[in-house]
Amino acid sequence: MKYGFGIDVGGTMVKIAFFDQLGELLHKWEIPTVTAEGGSRILPDIAAAVRSHLENAGVPKEDVLGIGVGVPGPVDGRGVVNRCVNLGWGVFNLHEMLGELTGLPVKAGNDANMAALGEAWKGGGQGYENMVFATLGTGVGGGVVLGGKVLCGVHGAGGEIGHMVLRKDETEPCGCGKYGCAEQYCSATGLVRMARGALEGFAGVSLLQSAGELTSKAIFDAAAAGDALAAEVLEQYYDCLGEFLANICCVIDPDIVVLGGGVSKAGKPLLEGVRRYFEKYIFHAAREVRLALATLGNDAGVYGAFQLALSEFGNIG
């Protein structure tokens, strides 16, 4: 039996998972992400954790296929990281550096792309070769999987779906500096922003007025309880999200679109609401694209990272 690691480097913690070659997650744990001194400790800490686990498990390096790594920034096919601001990283070859520290083959990719690959392999997109993954959280992340391979793009920026422009007349900037990005409307933050806008000058009575902290969950809960304003806000949200996903599918034409992130916890109401507008905007030939929910949660990144290593260094199934 061969083994390998899937690693998801986050801003505060590094998730590490140890798999067998068939994709069974045998053990997972976390270590702190030390971003001091330009993040110079991150890779040595990962290498130490890998070495320690192999020693404790009694697994020789010869039985390890390799290490897959997801990082919060662009990574090209050669493993060159092009700045991860929240880690303090500049430009360097992660394959080479972590490979030297561990003595193992390394393959790296963008963390959102790794999560997409994980959902395609073992999650909501399992069984489909072509998938769009959209995470609806504080922002909108995602990834595209075609023919079972994640789309990285020439500059490592493939799958940055959240920064497609939906509204050219937007006056507030997106976090990326542009105006009218899908992230401003289709994220959990965007949904809350819509609700706040609807409440301004609203003369009626709504559960949203007494919701305390206004969250995407509070909006879904209010709509489920029959609140007319919350239902109206959600229709606006479904319209934006349906248009956004339809535009992507006009280019990609995948088998399935998988929705993850905090908003996806709304479940069936989200899928049914988005489907109505998706069918309104989609090109007729792509009308049968399926919509589904993500299933791996926070483990999607480590699954995807390991699958990337498997495909690079000896995937047997």
Image (spheres, rainbow, N blue to C red):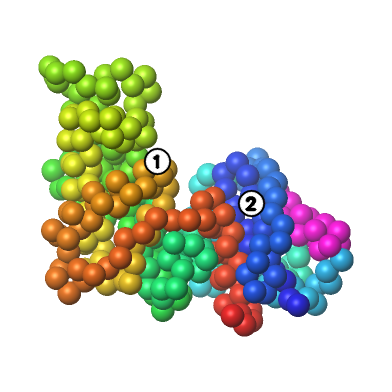
Mark 1: few/some/many CA within 10 Å (<14, 14-19, 20+):
some
Q: Is residue 46 magenta?
A: yes
Query: At which x and y percent is residue 22?
Result: 64, 74
Kindly state the secondary structure of the residue where label 1 is placed. Answer: loop
User: Is residue 183 shown left or right of residue 123?
Assistant: left
The reply to whether callout 1 and callout 2 are in contact (CB within 8 Å) is no
Instruction: Name the one closer to the observer, 264 or 246.
Output: 264
User: Is residue 79 shown left or right of residue 144?
Assistant: right
Kindly state the secondary structure of the residue where label 2 is placed. Answer: strand
Q: Which residue is mark 1?
A: 138
- Region in magenta: 41-57
Query: At which x and y percent is residue 171?
Result: 18, 37
The structure residue drawn at horizontal position 76% and vertical position 77%, both measured from the top left corner, is: 1
The structure residue drawn at horizontal position 59% and vertical position 80%, both measured from the top left corner, is: 317
Instruction: Name the one closer to the observer, 10 or 207.
Output: 207
- Name the N-terminal-most of marks 1 and 2: 2
Q: Which mark is residue 15?
A: 2
Kindly tell me whether residue 214 is visible in this rendering: yes
